[in-house]
Amino acid sequence: MGNRLSKIYTRTGDDGTTGLGNGKRVRKDDLRVEAYGTVDELNSAIGILAASDLPTEFSALIAGIQQRLFDLGGELSIPDTTTLSDAAIQELEHTIDSLNQGLPPLKDFILPGGTITAAACHMARAICRRSERKLITLAATEYVNDKSICYLNRLSDLLFVLSRTLNKRDDEPEVLWQGGRGNTD
């Protein structure tokens, strides 16, 4: 493969438009651009997680997720393209089930936080949920691979379970939501 990005700036977007993968020009605030832009933001948040004090046993998992998210961004940038399949979703489900076995059952909601790495998981989870919402909005008017929406839904679940796993591993207690009892007035 040659140098695909030999020039970083092209000036073609100075008019507020961008090119999709199929060559079509659209406004930069187009729903499709919003959707793949938010997936890119999610991938960046996952990158922060990867760069944090992540235990080595999770490095391959996170690297694989980043690859899939890049595939998803490509899928969204080329209308009518499909890259994600049931296998990607099943991979996440298997990992969720495996990690969840080692965790105590939840009786209350927990607040995002704990260790820096667990907090990075929570931040990525919140961005993942927004990405999922953007895809659902886009799917109301254009084709979106339903597997991609499912993938983001499972990924947010995985990030939640991973945050709990990381806090447990580091003996960091979960902070439970107090249901309105946190008010100080």
Image: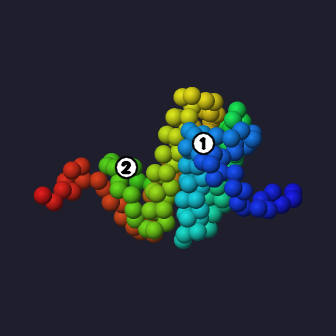
Rendered location of residue 117, percent (x, y): 49, 66
| Residue 123 vs residue 60, the one in the foreground | 123
Q: Secondary structure at mark 1?
A: strand
Can you name the residue that lies furthest to the front here?
15
> From this viewpoint, is residue 64 visible?
no
Q: Quadrant of the N terminus?
A: bottom right
Q: Is residue 153 above or below residue 46?
A: above
At x 73%, y 43%, the residue is 21
Q: Nearer the viewer, residue 38 or 162?
A: 38
CA gap between label 2 and label 1 equals: 44 Å
What is the image's colouring?
rainbow
Q: Nearer the viewer, mark 2 or mark 1?
A: 1
Image position, residue 64 (x, y; %): 67, 55
Residue at 45%, 68% in the rendered image:
116
Compared across the picture, whether 58 is left or right of 101 comes to right
User: Residue 27: which numbered mark, if any?
Assistant: 1
Amino acid type indicated by mark 2? Leu
| Quadrant assignment, res 34 | top right
At a point 39% along the width and 49% down the height, the residue shown is: 105
Label 2: element kind: loop
Say whether residue 171 is left or right of residue 38. Answer: left
x, y percent for residue 141 = 57, 28
Measuring from the top left, give residue 92's x and y in whole percent. Answer: 60, 47
Q: Is residue 80 visible?
A: yes
Three-letter amino acid code of the residue under disc 1: Arg
Q: Quadrant of the C terminus?
A: bottom left
Looking at this rendering, what residue extends furthest in the left direction?
185
The residue to which callout 2 is attached is: 106
Q: Which mark is residue 156?
A: none
